[in-house]
Amino acid sequence: MILKTKLFLGLVYLFTFIFTLAGFCYHYMRKLRLESGNVLTDNYNSMVYAKNMLSGLDDMKNSIISKMFNTNHQERISVDDMELFESGKDLFENNMIAVSNNITDTHEQEYVDKLRKECAIYLKFCRQINYGSDREPAFNDFMKSYEKLRQTVNSIYEINNQAVAHRLNKS
């Protein structure tokens, strides 16, 4: 083979190698961009779930407080308050399930586990107030439990909010 042919074949090989590498880079960069967009969407969804849980939690608290300050203590919780409590509970539990199926960040699973435990305690106090005779101590514990549960939901919101901000600042 003459030198010109060897040089030509070497350059063809080199350009083929460069274009193949560029194709792989394009493919993996595109794949990374799509995955990053999915993670961003999942973080946003977790934030929406957290906001919905706060709304449901507030509905449950408002119905319990309405019952506590009802002037006729013999009467059980009113139908409207019971419907508000049940709809708030359903909203909270459905979004708690959704957020537990949408774990995107490192410590989020820990907060979701903590959320489940605190929710069980909170619902126990709700039942004590609704059906118990000694409401005053249960109400104080209920409010402490409400605040803890609210803080945990806010922590989940904040983790996802920080992750969204971090990913947006990276791009």
Image (cartoon, rainbow, N blue to C red):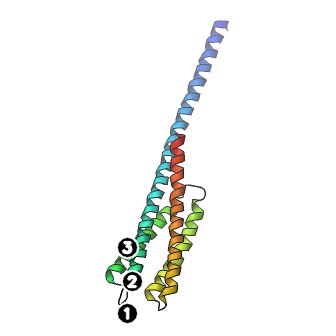
Q: How many C-alpha atoms fall within 10 Å of the one at disc 3: few (<14), some, or many (≥20)? A: some
Quadrant (top left, top right, bottom left, bottom right) of the N terminus: top right
Q: CA distance from mark 2 to mark 1?
A: 11 Å
From the viewer's perspective, is 17 left or right of 49?
right
Where is residue 118? Give x, y as percent: 55, 73
Q: Which residue is pictured at 59% across the width and 29% down the height?
A: 21
* Picture residue at 44% right of the left edge, 88% below the top: 131
- According to the picture, the residue beneath numbered tag 2 turns out to be 67
- Three-letter amino acid code at the position of disc 1: Gln
What residue type is disc 2 on?
Lys
Does label 3 or label 1 sit earlier along the sequence? 1
Type of amino acid at the residue the image marks with label 3? Ser
Instruction: Assess disc 1: are there few (<14), some (14-19) or many (≥20) residues with their C-alpha within 10 Å of its C-alpha.
Output: few
In the picture, measured across the screen, residue 66 lies left or right of residue 2, that is: left
Q: Looking at the image, is 91 positioned above or below residue 121?
A: above
Q: CA distance from mark 2 to mark 3?
A: 16 Å
Q: Which residue is mark 3?
A: 87
